[in-house]
Amino acid sequence: MANDTVSAIGGATSAAETQWDLWEVFTQEGEGAPHEHAGSVHAATAEHAMQNARDVYARRGKVVSLWVVPTGAIIASAPGDAGPLFDPGNDKAYRHPQFYKTPRGVRGL
Amino acid sequence: MTDQKSPTSAPAAGSTDDAAQVAEFEARIAQGESIEPKDWMPERYRKQLTRMMSQHAHSEIVGMLPEGNWITRAPSLRRKMVLLAKVQDEAGHGLYIYCGTETLGIGREELVDQLLTGKAKYSSIFNYPTLTWADIGVIGWFVDGAAIVNQTMLAKASFGPYARAMVRICKEENFHKKQGYESVATLANGTPEQRAMVQDAVNRWWWPSLMMFGPSDKDSPNSAELIRWRVKRDTNDTLRQRFVDLTVPQARAVNLTLPDPDLRYNEETEHWDFGEIDWTEFHEVISGNGPCNRERLAARRKAHDDGAWVREAAQAYAAKRDAVTAA
């Protein structure tokens, strides 16, 4: 699988002296909702990243939980791999319930 | 903010992009697909987006200065809280867009450096001074109103990270416009002095606000390409007209006049016709000779330099902690 030198989600990996590391931010908007990618922040440490993520992505609204992840730690699929990875498998009809016959009159299947 | 820029090299001149890849890319765009950072894209698309997005991010950051100027002098605690929240939002908006720009493969520090050295542009509107308290209301109404017209379009941009940043910004920006209009309406219904003050602010900000949409279509070399790549959906003039049509009735509702003798409703087109923009002023401000260009850049440079010790201290703390953990 192809892997770019650019970080997984495309952020630059420039490490100039005064530029803090890049962290990806995920927010959960409401109990039970999935964490979704919101954007990124620069920060020197994990706690710092959490604080910046709060200030930038949870100033208002429904955010109930935050994840911060070092950008370089994310492994992403490459666009070129989309075909084989995400083949819908339409030729495998047996993966769908419609493929199977049920005796007449049977319910709740 | 909008697409204001100095001329660039001719499209595709000297481009090394593979024709088949370009065709495939353009087919994806035509189908309304979203382009993501790791997808192949023409160098020119990457360059145009980097320019446009960083210019937009810089505008948010520089845009804090004219309004920040009035935080300590806001007339009530309510207005002060509102203004603080708005200026904080502008900082956040700048960060959303910088982070989107970074996915194109350029570091934020380099982008900031381009702003501080004067290599990158930002919206011309922020080079005008905020002379009275009424300016703050009028900025929310006109400047944020114009920004919403532009950003609502950009929320459908073909580049995913830009579009997503715009969606996030548009959600927050409506508060900016409404607080501004409320403040304007309050002054417009106030004492004769307050009325005169807000009318004066309207008179000063109207034309620069129309200039925010960038050069007229016949003088906008980038538009066709940006529209073909669906970075933009509408031309500068279309967006400008949309803003005028929205704003004229709002001005009438609070009995304020817009400083344009040629402004009249056109029954045929069902749009408000307006007078010619002073493009000489626009180009002067864009090229660095507006009333506050030097002051704005000097303020940004000072803020950046004054913050150097904070950046260094955080890094030193992280390094020290790493050393302790390793030991």
Image (cartoon, rainbow, N blue to C red):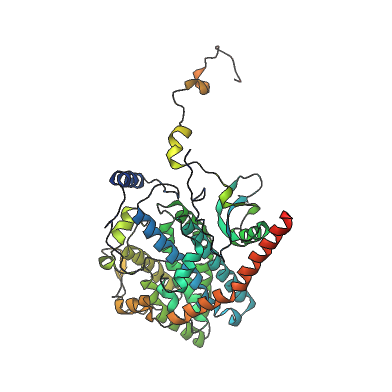
**Considering depth in this image, is A71 or B220 the residue closer to the camera?**
A71
Residue B173 appears in the rendering: no
Rendered residue at 56%/69% (across/down): B86
Q: Is residue B182 left or right of residue B207?
A: right
Q: Position of residue B74 (x, y in %)?
A: 59, 80
Counting the numbered discs, the total is 0
Position above or below: B190 against A102: below
Q: Position of residue B48 (x, y in %)?
A: 37, 59
Q: Is residue A108 left or right of residue B109?
A: right
Residue A48 appears in the rendering: yes
Q: In the orientation shown, which residue stands out farthest toward the bottom?
A: B193
> Is the C terminus of chain B in the top left, top right, bottom left or bottom right quadrant?
bottom right
**Considering depth in this image, is B147 or B227 the residue closer to the camera?**
B227
> Is the N terminus of chain B in the top left, top right, bottom left or bottom right quadrant?
bottom left
Q: Position of residue B82 (x, y in %)?
A: 59, 71
Position above or below: A24 against B94: above
Q: In the orientation shown, which residue stands out farthest toward the front?
A: B327
Rendered residue at 48%/38% (across/down): A1
**Considering depth in this image, is B56 or B200 the residue closer to the camera?**
B56
Position above or below: B2 against B155: below
Q: Position of residue A33 (x, y in %)?
A: 62, 45
Q: Is residue B324 left or right of residue B195?
A: right
**Considering depth in this image, is B218 or A83 the residue closer to the camera?**
A83
Position above or below: B290 against B265: below
